[in-house]
Amino acid sequence: MTDSSREFQGTSLLSEKTSEIIIDSPDQLLPLAKQLKDKGYDHVISLSAVDYPKSNELHLVIHISSYTKRDLQPKVFELRVKLKKSEPKVPSLINIWPSVEFQEREAYEMFGIVFEGHPDLRNILLDQEEFSGVHPLLKDFKIPEEDITLKLKEDVKSGTNK
């Protein structure tokens, strides 16, 4: 493990350049994020989530690196925050890394994760009215089916299918 990753409790080495930190409580995220930012990790590469239906958990997955410090550039931290699927709330990272704004909005929209303190938490890709409360990347998401046969019969009867 590199010297920089030894500074953070609970760090495990995923590869030569990537270390993972598993965060068991959302309350631990902001202090750790501030620590990483103070060390020079100034960029969120990606933010997404993984749905684990058997354990009824969501894992918020955040990849952090640095643009400005050459010695940190090849190093990536993967922060994995365990969330209860019934209450997927976590503090927003927008005040630490402003570039995370749209990634948090997408995770909110697709997985239903609420980023407390986010200034504009609304859908970014899907229609807000049509997809309110619907999170298509959850594994229990069901695609609504439409009976096209019935619709065609109605169109023929009404004369609109010409």
Image (cartoon, grey):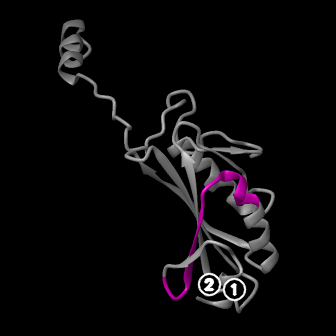
- Residue positioned 73% across, 57% down in the render: 93
SS at badge 1: helix
143 to the left or right of 82: left
SS at badge 2: loop
Mark nearer the N terminus (2 vs 1): 1
Rendered location of residue 78, percent (x, y): 58, 70
Q: Which residue is mark 2?
A: 75
| Quarter of the figure with residue 88 | top right
Residue 110 shows which numbered tag?
none
Viewer-proximal residue among 69 and 130 = 69
Taking 43 as reference, is 116 above or below it?
Answer: above
Q: Few, some or many C-alpha atoms within 10 Å of disc 2 (few <14, some 14-19, many ≥20)?
A: some
Rendered location of residue 18, percent (x, y): 55, 80
- Residue positioned 53% across, 31% down in the render: 133
Q: Which residues are magenta?
A: 15-30
Q: Which residue is mark 1?
A: 4
**Disc 2 marks which amino acid?**
Lys
Taking 94 as reference, is 128 above or below it?
Answer: above
| Quarter of the figure with residue 152 | top left
Contact check, label 2 and label 1, Cβ < 8 Å: yes
Quadrant assignment for the N terminus: bottom right
Taking 19 as reference, is 81 above or below it?
Answer: above
Q: Is residue 74 magenta?
A: no
Rendered location of residue 160, percent (x, y): 26, 14
73 to the left or right of 39: left
Residue 162 in sight: no
Which one is in front in this view, the residue at disc 2 or the one at disc 1?
Answer: 1
**Disc 1 marks which amino acid?**
Ser
Alpha-carbon span between mark 2 and mark 1: 9 Å
Q: Is residue 17 magenta?
A: yes
Quadrant assignment for the C terminus: top left
Q: Few, some or many C-alpha atoms within 10 Å of disc 1 (few <14, some 14-19, many ≥20)?
A: few
